[in-house]
Image (spheres, rainbow, N blue to C red):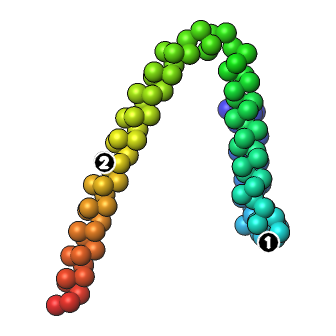
Amino acid sequence: MSIRLLLYLGILIFGGYFGYKGYGGKNLDSKLGVIQTICLLFLLFIMGLKMGLDEKVISSFLELGFQALVISIFTITFSVILVKLIKGFVIKNIQQGEQKNEH
């Protein structure tokens, strides 16, 4: 296993333990959304910077964009279909359970 992966896992476990013990307090808890958004925007900026510096990514941008579009369309389509199927199944089971309780 890579040292970097172990470091990430260790930081994740430490953060989970820190939150579980309640060391953050209400003040930190109320600001976590803002902190997460800032960190996400910084991460996206760094990823864009790295992509912009890579000549192979720039030269194959249209091909990668098309592949990303196809993957996104399939992901969204099948996610919606799966949610509708599961929702119908769950609602049907709930209604059957309610009917059994009425008798």
Q: Earlier in the sequence, mark 2 or mark 1?
A: 1
Q: Is residue 67 left or right of residue 54?
A: left
Q: Secondary structure at mark 1?
A: helix
1 or 25, which is in the foreground?
25
Q: Horizontal and vertical percent for residue 11?
A: 77, 48
Compared with 66, 2 (above or below) is: below
- Neighbourhood count class around disc 1 (C-alpha, 10 Å): few under 14, some 14–19, many 20 upward: few
Q: Are marks 2 and 1 in contact (CB under 8 Å)?
A: no
Quarter of the image holding residue 39? top right
Residue named by callout 2: 81
Residue at point 61% right, 15% down?
57
Quarter of the image holding residue 16? bottom right
Give the residue type that dot 1 points to: Lys
Residue named by callout 1: 26
Tell which residue pokes out farthest to the bottom in this image. 103
Residue at mark 2 to residue at mark 1: CA–CA distance: 39 Å
Give the residue type that dot 2 points to: Ile
Q: Horizontal and vertical percent for residue 80?
A: 35, 48
Image quadrant where one finds the N terminus: top right
Q: Horizontal and vertical percent for residue 59?
A: 59, 9
Q: Secondary structure at mark 2?
A: helix
Compared with 34, 90 (above or below) is: below
